[in-house]
Amino acid sequence: MNEQVIKDVLAQVLTRVLDEVAHGDASHAAAHPTGPIPVELSARHVHLSEQDAVALFGAPLTHARDLSQPGQFLCKERVRLIGPKGVMDNVAILGPSRGKSQVEISKTDARMLGVDAPVRQSGDIAGTPGIILASQTGIVGLDEGVIVAARHIHMSPEDAARFGVTDNEKVCVRLCTERPLILEEVLVRVSDKFKLAMHIDADEGNGSGWKNGIEGIIIGKSGSSHGLCGR
């Protein structure tokens, strides 16, 4: 086989591969719209039960400003986290009150405090570590409730239909930052009370170069024989 024949064969193979890739990307785009999703940084914060709020501050929580998710708000009150190895002051409290108190931190925060916080969906606190919460006027000890919140996307049912996903499904998202990063196992949470937004923690934000206005793109669904971010 002479050199020209080899070149012709290679050219044909390259053309076929590029054509398959192009058709594959087109079919994927049709099945899974790739519209942008606002990506918000969820810094360490606390959700309090009304009982614990009263124990810490002598009264229910007070509204400071609304957050992006409808009905959620930042409280005027702040709390101190006291762990076995460290303390964190001026930690934000988010309202409204919940049935059980919960502390959401990053893995870096967990190491500083000395707690082995697992990655969990918000509200899934059974068997998680406890911590001490303190204010200027009160103190509360939690037997459990410290988690690293699983990265997730809030969607309305209309958003979920548009993106071709369902509640509790997991997807892969590319963060469009100066240090582009693909995050796997991103939990989709669907409710008619939600507004479209993806939430990541401080560690993920720092690793990707996150800043206000950053968006993400769903590039596939997690779970595939070809890898986690299969198409």
Image (cartoon, helix red, strand yellow):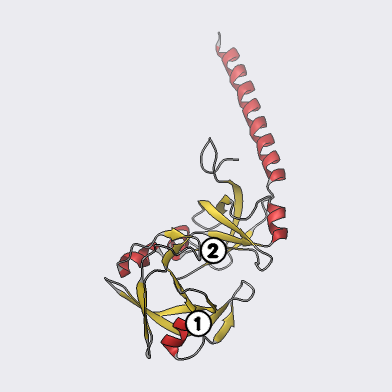
Residue 25 image position (x, y, % from top left): 66, 40
Mark 1 or mark 2: whose residue is earlier in sequence? 1
167 vs 34, nearest the viewer = 167
25 vs 186, nearest the viewer = 186
- The number of numbered discs placed on residues in the rendered structure image is 2
Could you give the CA–CA distance between mark 1 and mark 2, rounded to whole angstroms? Answer: 25 Å
Would residue 31 appear left or right of 46 to someone viewing this image?
A: right
Vertical side of 34 occupied by 62: above or below: below
Residue carrying label 1: 50
Q: Residue at x 38, y 91 (%)?
A: 137
Q: Which image quarter holds the N terminus?
A: top right
Q: Secondary structure at mark 2?
A: strand
Vertical side of 16 occupied by 106: above or below: below
69 vs 30, nearest the viewer = 69
Q: Residue furthest top?
A: 1
Vertical side of 229 occupied by 205: above or below: below
Residue carrying label 2: 199
Q: Residues within 10 Å of mark 2 (few under 14, many from 20)?
A: many
Q: Residue furthest left?
A: 85
Of the residues shown, which amino acid type is indicated by label 2? Answer: His
Identify the image quadrant of residue 106: bottom left
Identify the image quadrant of residue 134: bottom left
Q: Secondary structure at mark 1?
A: helix
Q: Residue at x 60, y 47 (%)?
A: 219
Residue 44 image position (x, y, % from top left): 44, 71
Q: Residue at x 56, y 9 (%)?
A: 2
Q: Residue at x 59, y 14 (%)?
A: 4
Of the two numbered discs 1 and 2 in the rendering, the one whose residue sits closer to the viewer: 1
Would residue 97 appear left or right of 164 to someone viewing this image?
A: left
